[in-house]
Image (cartoon, rainbow, N blue to C red):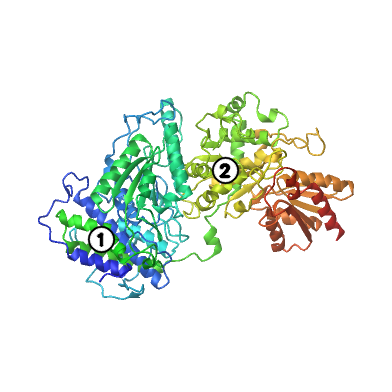
Amino acid sequence: MLIDVTTPQHLDDRFRESLGALPEPERRRDPAQPVRDGAALTGHQLLALFDAQVTSRQLDLAGRWLRSFGEGFYTIGSAGHEANAAVAAALRPTDPALLHYRSGAFYCIRAARAAGEFPAAGGDEALPTSGAPEPAGAPDDATSPVSGDEPSDERATRPDPSPVGGAPTGAAAYQVGADGTAEAVPAPADPVADPTDADPAAGGGATSGDPAFGAVQPDAYAVAARDVLRGMVASTREPLAGGRHKVFGRADLAVVPTTSTIASHLPRAVGLGLALERLRRVETAGRREGADAPPRSPWPRDAIVVCSFGDASVNHASATAALNTAGWYDHTGLRIPVLFVCEDNGLGISVRSPQGWVERTLRARPGLRWFAADGADPVETYRVAAEAAAWVRRHRRPAVLHLRTVRLLGHAGADAESAYRSAAEIAADEARDPLLATARLLVEAGLATGGELLSRYDERGWQIRRIAEEVLDEPKLATAAEVVAPLAPRRPARVAAAVAEVAARAGGSAAGARVEAFGGKPPELAGPLTLAQSINAALADGLLAHPHMAVFGEDVAAKGGVYGVTKGLREKFGPARVFDTLLDETSVLGLGLGAGLAGLLPVPEIQYLAYLHNAEDQLRGEAATMQFFSQGAFRNPMVVRVPGLAYQEGFGGHFHNDNSVAVLRDVPGLVIAVPARPDDAAPLLRTCLAAAAVDGSVCVVLEPIALYHTRDLYEPGDGEWLGQYAEPGGWAAGHVPIGRARVYGVGSAQDVTILTFGNGVRMSLRAAAVLADEGIGTRVVDLRWLAPLPVADIIREASATGRVLVVDETRRSGGVGEGIIAALVDAGYVGAARRVAGVDSFVPLGPAARQVLVSEEAITQGARTLLAR
């Protein structure tokens, strides 16, 4: 009897009943032949799809069972979306895939394809790119697709970060009741042999029988199932995240972990597609020119990116940004080989997608080729997916596959669908169960009977259940140190060595190229430089030292940046390495995320700090989590330049004088550098570039706009804020490790310590000069790093005077000063402490800004108050 909510037991019972009701096939068909006339799928392939779909469904049931007694921590399943198995079959196992959370069947097929266990698929016979016709309107220049490429199915070279498999234990059957509880049921006779007789990585034991329709064999599906189950129970043996999150991801499967459900991974996919094409062109050009070891992509040269998401996510700003950016670049002639897969079940948890809205939205996107398929027909889904993948692979242009699916078992384990769906709606979705659709087709094609498929379903279920019990006893993360180990690795000695190596090349083998790049006058011979000029020179040296480095953002190329900081870089290094982007911060960072994933060293610019807030999740949810959720198997090194902070005179309002950095300091593992002085700018930037290259670090260089062109410190014309640019021979000695401050002594430097950064450094030095005239000696500590804070230097310099004044140009609430004071307290500092900070306000226009920002007068008065205690 139909009930008004689909439970695991109900879905299982209904599937069994439906299989039992299937008629006997009229005749048996050769499984090596197409399943029906004109079909691309063979019987062997369709059976393999069925096995993957069954594995995914059984994983969903196992997840609910594990949760019923508190041992499973993730119940969002793939039931109803198993049609994505056909999409995976149409792709190559070396096509990088960024998958949403209902991708169980896709993951199983990807594992089988990588292991060579899936019968030859259409993706392997995709049309070759060699001699492919150019898309209409493609420009005949460096941005056009490269001809002469050979199809490749080579395996990705990234290693599997951890072994798959674990110590097997005895098996016991279970069944999920309608109330979500588990009860023991008798096991069928010899469901799977003792797992100790088989490779534990396979997830099951050896069986006998017809390999086509008999007992389930140890296979890649079992390995994939073990991966997923380990994620559900937070096992440290899960091969990618290691118990930190349940993800679909493995480096050797080219499946990149994604952590969001609302399309935040789509901008990365666009960036990855653009980066793959750039590397493809560079490699081809290098081959033609006979260059030594041209840069190579970690994926095959003709790889495409596949990125899946749900229908509700099409409305999210991240999806809008990504789809728009892909179309924008396609319109300009740049190629982005990305296949977006929108799996449309008509629901976003409980909110319905309006009828026809998703199709209309996707079809209206300029620059995106639209394909559509019904997931209830595996043959059609496979055909359309193969056609879409072949089109993207040949033309190197973006496309979207709109795949109609259903959602079974609700959004997650705690979701009561009866609150927002009728029994008729639920029944309609059950009738379109993709697993049942595949079973019907197998019977209609004469490839199996309902009973044979049911036997296969049960045997796979027992295999999954045994693996579920085995992973229960695997270790969990037990200490904070274990949890954070892969978050942001720091190898300061290697970073210092990398800086020294760059310096040696710049002063040695690359000296001639460096002089030529600077037009015969390297910056160390140009005299004292401003902060902006020092950053410009350091970026040029970075581009010379790192062939994979690219500088990009709004207005950074032709204009040279709003403040001229990137002026001349495009002329020196060309438009492939220094280029303008469209006006969208989410997409700018997404391009960086994809480029870093592809092995490049991206240096994107966010034009103003205030604009970063539009796209902050690309740093928090995507960039900073990549190593954390992949244990370093994937990384997205990046150095983000952000002009910001306040004190611009004659140009204002809070969009151009934003003093809010709390959104950055709250991101675990993020490195934040703030160069205040010209002679610090290059060393800090070199350190960030080296940390990104060596450790995969995600760094933000927050550049004080008001100091870009400042020349004087105390008096007009004194030139005290200019700085010499060090020659390469001095780079190693002048290296600034992450988390090391700089100390200035004024007068006796024995009376008060000022802890500050950015604009506060110049104001504090000016205030210290006034205090020196009063006989007060000051230590001015330029933190230089806001994350991680230079805690050791803070404590040492605070203890030296016993009086600390924190000068924080950000706000009192959520500002940097709170972190500094907390560090002092945690360290047991017992001296006097005081802070001056910005008011909790946006920065207003014109002279009113002085009412809410820190002033030199407030600094001198704060120091006097400390001394008066």
Mark 2, other Cα within 10 Å: few <14 / some 14–19 / many ≥20 = many
- Residue found at the far front of this picture: 355
The image quarter containing residue 185 is: bottom left
Q: Nearer the viewer, residue 620 or 188?
A: 620
Position of the N terminus by quadrant: bottom left
Q: In this view, does 312 lie to the left or right of 727?
A: left
Q: Which of 26 and 278 is in front in this view?
A: 26
Residue 240, position in %: x, y? 43, 55
Q: Are the residues at dot 1 and dot 2 in contact (C-beta closer than 8 Å)?
A: no
The label on residue 701 is none
Q: In this view, does 828 lie to the left or right of 538?
A: right
* Mark 2, residue position: 639
Q: Is mark 1 on a helix, strand or loop?
A: helix
Looking at the rendered structure, the kind of residue marked 1 is Ala
Residue 329, position in %: x, y? 45, 36
**Gap in angstroms between the C-alphas marked 1 and 2:** 51 Å
Position of the C terminus by quadrant: bottom right
Q: Which of marks 1 and 2 is nearer the N terminus?
A: 1
* Mark 1, residue position: 431
In this view of the protein, can residue 114 be seen by the observer?
no
